């Protein structure tokens, strides 16, 4: 796939990537200025010549993706001196992040609160998978950008989510809530897990989860009751606003933390004159 076709497809999928372009060449280099490569978290499209240069470019691009960096970067590479490539020239690469960072959210349950919550989440910079086993529970109009998933075994959908996802469980069945909870906690790589219910429900679930061998530190990451305590009310829309507020707060805190750490790691790759 060409780099421009890859960009179009990734944009349609809402997947972040970095466009790497050779903007300057000096001496002998593997590819000419204007050559491009698209880098995602797990794939590349096109090439800037292979070898150690391409490896370092992929490494830096994926560092930018992992830290959600949205700033363009210029990097100069000496192919012989620093990268050990036989061509021995020098090249300057432009790194351009494409696509805004998006939270990946799985909402289990199409009941009253789910129907109030999903439109709120759909208006945020996130991708939502709305999951239920009951087709007739979904409204006729699904918000733009939301994937409706009807699956008799909704637990199977947990493994479809990428690492760092947000999980929200609010089904019609307490036993199903428990099984979903166990599967999500077992993964352990979630950014947020919220379970609808009272403190009494949490105590009961924790007791059953301990019997299955889950430790306290992992269970402590479960938000139940979920939502911002400052947002009062029992109407579905009030509960939905409370949950959406907590998701936003979690996302903003996570984004800021990752960006700060990422800047310090990337800084080590830059010449000393460009770290100020």
Image (cartoon, rainbow, N blue to C red):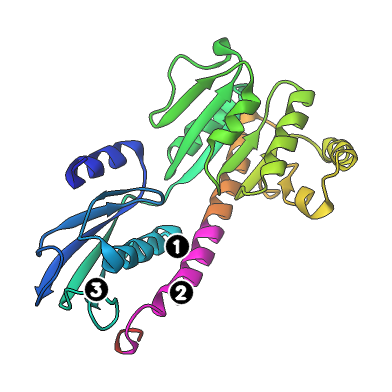
Q: Earlier in the sequence, mark 3 or mark 1?
A: 1
Q: What residue did someone put label 1 on?
A: 67
110 over 187 or under it: above or below: above
Q: Is residue 237 visible?
A: no
Q: Nearer the viewer, mark 3 or mark 2?
A: 3
Could you tell me if the residues under marks 1 and 2 are in contact, i.e. CB atoms within 8 Å?
yes
Residue of label 2: 265
Front position in the image: 114 or 160: 160
- Residue 99 point in image, percent of width and height: 32, 49
Q: Residue furthest bottom?
A: 273
Give me the disc on residue 85.
3
Confirm whether the magenta stretch covers residue 7. no
First to last magenta residue range? 252-272
Outermost residue on the top side: it is 136
Q: Quadrant of the N terminus?
A: top left
Measured in 3D between alpha carbons, the distance from the residue under mark 3 to the one under mark 1, in whole angstroms, is: 29 Å
């Amino acid at each position: 796939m060409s780099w421009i076709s890859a960009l179009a497809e990734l944009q349609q999928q809402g997947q972040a990537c970095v466009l790497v372009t050779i903007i300057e060449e000096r001496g002998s280099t593997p590819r000419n200025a204007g050559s491009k490569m698209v880098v995602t978290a797990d794939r590349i499209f096109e090439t800037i010549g292979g070898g150690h240069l391409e490896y370092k470019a992929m490494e830096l691009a994926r560092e930018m993706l992992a830290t959600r960096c949205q700033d363009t970067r210029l990097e100069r590479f000496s192919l012989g001196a620093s990268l050990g490539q036989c061509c021995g020239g020098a090249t300057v690469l432009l790194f351009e992040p494409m696509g805004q960072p998006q939270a990946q959210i799985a909402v289990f349950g199409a009941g009253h609160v789910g129907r109030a919550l999903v439109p709120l989440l759909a208006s945020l910079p996130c991708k939502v998978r709305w999951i239920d086993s009951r087709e007739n529970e979904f409204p006729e109009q699904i918000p733009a950008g939301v994937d409706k998933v009807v699956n008799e075994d909704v637990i199977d959908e947990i493994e479809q989510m990428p690492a760092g996802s947000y999980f929200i469980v609010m089904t019609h069945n307490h036993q199903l809530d428990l099984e979903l909870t166990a599967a999500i906690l077992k993964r352990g790589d979630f950014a947020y897990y919220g379970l609808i219910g009272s403190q009494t429900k949490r105590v009961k679930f924790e007791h059953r989860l301990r019997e299955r061998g889950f430790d306290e530190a992992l269970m402590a990451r479960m938000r139940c009751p979920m939502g911002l305590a400052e947002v009062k009310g029992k109407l579905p829309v009030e509960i939905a606003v409370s949950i959406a507020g907590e998701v936003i707060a979690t996302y903003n805190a996570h984004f800021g933390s990752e960006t700060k750490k990422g800047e310090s790691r990337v800084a080590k790759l830059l010449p000393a004159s460009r770290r100020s």
